[in-house]
Image: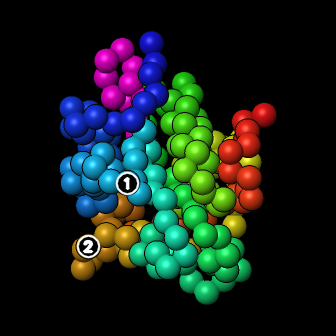
Amino acid sequence: MRAVRHIRREDVPGALAISLVELGSDYLSERDFLDAIDSDSQFCIVSEDDGRITGFGICRVFGPSEEPEVLGLPDCPEREIVLSHDLCGIIDSVSVDDSVKGTGAGSAIVEECRRELASRGCTLTCAMAWRSVSGRTNIAGILKRLGMRESVAIEGYWNGMVDSPEGHHCPECGAPCRCHGVFWYMESRFPHTSFLG
């Protein structure tokens, strides 16, 4: 039986274990998960299958002045879109365990993240998806079903998101990472309306 809910402190080791495999050793730490529990501007949604944490999504609510820290987009039309919204939400760091891939766990997490961002008043929801050097984008299908639009792709994006002089230690291509960050977004001037159809 699957439950999708907010993370609890006792869930952190399970979520961190998934992160280490899926996102690499230097991307998220225990502190990142704890911060998502204790913050007003962040939250983390987990999937739990039969008592075991099988996936997570960390989200953040932010304003235009925080765009450089949260997204770090280059000068492009997409950055201007972000800056035009008073309150944005990013669905970030979504990962699921290999044992539940293809079972809907990722979709359930992302849909719950989007619901909560809308309930917090975000009129723009975005995600930075990971496109590997082999060309696979990790959650493209989920984001499309949610109604998000793919836009700018930035090569080596993840190197700027870690505190490591050699760049991100990518599980696929090593350090520095050569994968792309792909910006996806959807706008809604009426954040409380249904988006699932």
The answer to whether the residue labelled 1 contacts the one labelled 2, judged by CB atoms less than 8 Å apart, is no
Q: How is colour applied across the structure in the image?
A: rainbow
Q: Amino acid at mark 2?
A: Asp
Q: What segment is highlighted magenta in the picture?
A: 46-56
Residue 65 percent coordinates (x, y): 50, 79
**Residue 47 is covered by the magenta coloring:** yes
Q: Quick one: quadrant of the N terminus?
A: top left
**167 displayed left or right of 92:** left
Q: Is residue 102 visible?
A: no
Q: Is residue 154 above or below residue 32?
A: below
**147 displayed left or right of 159:** right
Label 2, secondary structure: give it.
loop
In the rendered image, the residue lying farthest to the bottom is 75
Pointer 1 or 2: first along the chain? 1
**Residue 40 bears which disc, if any?**
1
**148 displayed left or right of 165:** right
Q: Amino acid at mark 1?
A: Asp
In this rendering, the label closer to the viewer, 1 or 2: 1
Residue 193 percent coordinates (x, y): 73, 43
**Residue 183 is covered by the magenta coloring:** no
- The residue lying toward the viewer, choosing from 196 and 192, is 192
For the point 54% across and 25% down, the residue is 103
Label 1, secondary structure: give it.
loop
Give the Cα distance between marks 1 and 2.
Answer: 24 Å
For the point 24% across and 74% down, the residue is 164
**67 displayed left or right of 145:** left
Q: Which residue is mark 2?
A: 163
For the point 38% across and 24% down, the residue is 48
